[in-house]
Amino acid sequence: MSNVIADVAVIGGGASGLMLAANLDIGDAVGIVLEGSAVLGSKLLMSGGGHCNITHGGSIKDFINAYGNEGQALRRCLYSHSNTELMKWFEGIGIELNDEDGRVFPASMRARDILDALIGEAASNLWQIETGTKVVSLIKDDDWVIRLENGFEFRSHNVVIACGGITYPETGSDGSMHGLLAELGIGVSELRPALAPVYVRDYPYAELAGVSLSDVAVTAFGSDAATTCKGKAARMTGDILFTHDGFSGPAILNISKYAEAAEKIRLSYNKELEELPKRMQRILKDRARGESGDVKTKLLASLLDHDDFTVDRVDERGMVTAGGVKLDEIDMKTMQVKQSDGLYVIGEALDADGITGGYNLQMCWSTACTCADDLRSKLQ
């Protein structure tokens, strides 16, 4: 690849990078997808427990709140390239889809089918795909100068950052590209795991591993609330899952990016004692016993209403990454960095992430297709 001059170089062969290549016929131009690891789409293969929850059904208007404070900034992309478009596109290339309570999967329930379809479409669009090509330097000259770990260096008129985040670094998402972007003066917020299990100190529910509860309100308190639980808080309601060593399930995963080590997390079970599993009733009663051995009814009621724990850590292997390139650095009409002509950022590399249910892959699609629109106009 030495002495190559590309029209578009996509850094990252995961969901967003492949979605862009699958939707942009490069024609007579030179388009290269660079994947730092040995294989493409490793993390995509893990999504949805290997089933690949590609999006959520329903109105795209309902998606905005799924991304928290970043939802409004993503609105234009989401509306321009919606969940309906994504589903029609996959069905148009022969992927049958199923909607399970709003969660949209391939009918085969195989993430591999989604990955193979994206790779196939990218190849049909004449993209050159290279694995084992980790980028170690990105410099702006007349063009963008890209240096690879293997020593090769080449130029590209346009560069698309589709590098993912920091979770599962063995898949190529190691956060190194964000460091290179920061060196270029581009604003990057702290990278941290999201959609991850949360582990707490003095966890009392190991024997409930595998048990789930519905309609539990989970509150994560900010760092100004370490002892009082009166500071800034984030709150989610939904199912939780007890594991051998911590909490998981949708409500926990969705709030995990707000959970901070040494700070408080609160569970409100929204149930009477008798409505809980019998083993959990026993554990709560044991925790509510006084020195005399009697169950303290007020303490028991308090545990049902606000069972407070101190966070030990959030699992490093979150499904997605919170943080990334700040959205105010990006022209959301094109996904181009405002102060860097020809440099684009899409997908999980952005400082935006959604709750569980297909919203994160939808963001990859919407931002990738928005970027493809702008590049298409440049290449014409």
Image (cartoon, rainbow, N blue to C red):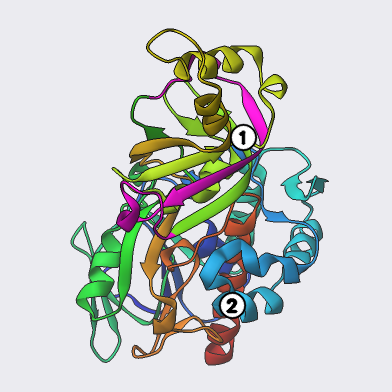
Span highlighted in magenta in the image: 203-232
* Residue type for callout 2: Gln
Q: Position of residue 201 (x, y in %)?
A: 33, 30
Q: Earlier in the sequence, mark 1 or mark 2?
A: 2
Which residue was labeled with disc 2? 72
Mark 1 lies on residue: 269
Q: Quadrant of the C terminus?
A: bottom right
- Above or below, 74 against 235 in this view is below
Give the class, few, some or many, for how many residues have Cα within 10 Å of label 1's Cα (few <14, many ≥20).
many
Q: Is residue 209 magenta?
A: yes
For image coordinates 50% across by 48% down, the residue present is 219
Asked if 297 appears above or below 55 in the picture, the reply is above
Vertically, is 201 above or below 147?
above
Q: Quadrant of residue 121?
A: bottom right
Q: Residue at x 66, y 37 (%)?
A: 270
Indicate whether 160 appears above or below 119.
below
The amino acid type found where label 1 is placed reads: Tyr
User: Nearest the camera: 362 or 110?
Assistant: 362
Report helix, strand or loop for mark 1: loop
Q: CA distance from mark 1 to mark 2?
A: 31 Å
Secondary structure at badge 2 equals helix
Give the left or right position of residue 163, taking residue 67 as reference: left
- The residue carrying pointer 2 sits among few (fewer than 14), some (14 to 19) or many (20 or more) residues within 10 Å by Cα, namely some
Mark 1 and mark 2 in contact? Answer it, CB < 8 Å. no
Q: Tell me which residue sits at (66%, 17%) in the image.
A: 277
Quadrant in the picture for the N terminus: bottom left
Look at the image and say whether residue 373 sits in the magenta stretch.
no
**How far from the left and from the top, in percent, is residue 61?**
74, 71
